[in-house]
Amino acid sequence: MNVLKLYLEENQETELHPSEIANILRELDEEHFTEAIQLIPKDIIGDIALSLPDRYFGDIVESLDVKGLKEAVSQLESDDQTDFMQELHEHDEHVASKVFEKLDKEDQIDIIRLQNYDNDQAGSYMQTEVFTAIKDEVVQNLVSRFAQLKKSNELENVHTLFITTNEKTLRYSIDLEDLLIFDFSKTLHENIIESSDSFEPITARDTDDISEVVQAFEEYDLSVMPIINKKNMLLGRITSDDIYDIISEKATEQMYNLAGVNDDTEEDEEILKSGKKRASWLGLNLITAILASLVIGLFSNTIESIVALAILMPIVASMGGNAGTQTLTVVVRQLALGDISHTDATRIIKKEVSISLINGILFAIVMGIIASIWFDKGLLLGLVIALSMLINLVMAGFFGATIPLLLKRMDVDPAIGSTVILTTVTDIVGFFSFLGLATIILL
């Protein structure tokens, strides 16, 4: 608490960055958190609320009245306004309605427009605040207008000028640094015609999938992308900071899905809700474990005859599971990054199976030697575990690559369910091959 107060006092003459204050707030206990919120300027508290983990949002809302919340929302850009109001609505519908009613009409229209898009559409991530000009505007007049807008704080984070027709159809996109070399006495259109550079914009439709927009940012190294509708009318922009957030969210979601948990649920403070979601996946894992146990049960007589099999059996399953997880993680991540095309399936499977075959041969020899020295029936037992390990690692590589590719083709998130399916395959193949070979060779 004292740290935050001192920090604010020391930085009265400079612009405070919300992330720095958010870091300090994370260190405060509940007793001081509410008091600290009252010290924060209302014009940045919205950014701070969105910078903090979701569990803090309710505490911030409870610390402010409707007037304070309205001021906090008003200072945000349109995409952040929409996110804030969505979270506020989930926290308290009544308060959210009151805050929305007090917002400016223009802010209300922007929020409603962005909320109408699906979560995976580019339109739901765009900012409606854009700096535009008509192609016939004189550059000198444009620069003066831009300076005035900046002085009045009506523009933020503007690095690109979008040039449109009178009907708001997007024609060109110009970085502000390129604008400096234009002839200020001529119109924008005259300068563009005389220039040897191309100012054709790389655009996205408001209904495009956001993953395609992310790929375009990475492919063309963009800092901003204009968003248009089907009539090529400029609607807004998506900036690189939005893309960083999307990439982070997708990576987090992917990690959670591979572990069989839901990212939204895990951020929720309700223990029962999170526990219920995890229990569903654990239940599925239990079923797969029972299937593996049934395979083991088929060879109970073999295990009773040779106790060493029970000791070595988990090694085969474990190695297969780990090898499969390595392949699965690589393929799922490459699919998420767009590094695997529709024609790449055969190449990916061949590559992963080849890697698994090489590792399979290596560890089959190592484990075969260890088993031969460790137990009676040395050479034959070593041969059994070597062959079964080779089989399981190759199958792990094959299914580790095939499962996510098949799920992707079925338009299912490759991360969801892949781990459970792969674990089932490697356990069953590992136990069956090891115990089956032992029955044939050792008995």
Image (tube, rainbow, N blue to C red):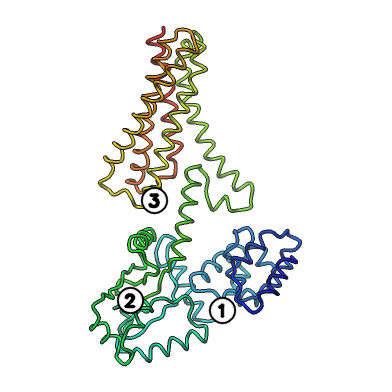
Q: CA distance from mark 1 to mark 3?
A: 38 Å
Residue 228: image location, x then y, percent: 34, 72
Quarter occupied by the C terminus: top left
Q: CA distance from mark 1 to mark 2?
A: 31 Å
| Vertical position of residue 163 compared to residue 8: above or below | below
Mark 3 / mark 2, whichever is N-terminal: 2
> In the displayed structure, does residue 59 sit left or right of residue 125?
right
Mark 1 closeness class: few <14, some 14–19, many ≥20 residues within 10 Å: some
Q: Quadrant of residue 277?
A: top right
Give the residue number, with chain letter if any, for mark 1: 103
Element class at badge 2: strand
Q: CA distance from mark 3 to mark 2?
A: 29 Å
Tell me the amino acid under the disc marked 1. Leu
- Residue at x 47%, y 68% (from the top left corner): 115
Mark 2 closeness class: few <14, some 14–19, many ≥20 residues within 10 Å: many
Give the residue number, with chain letter if any, for mark 2: 173
Mark 1 / mark 2, whichever is N-terminal: 1
Tell me the amino acid under the disc marked 3. Ala
Q: Residue furthest front?
A: 181
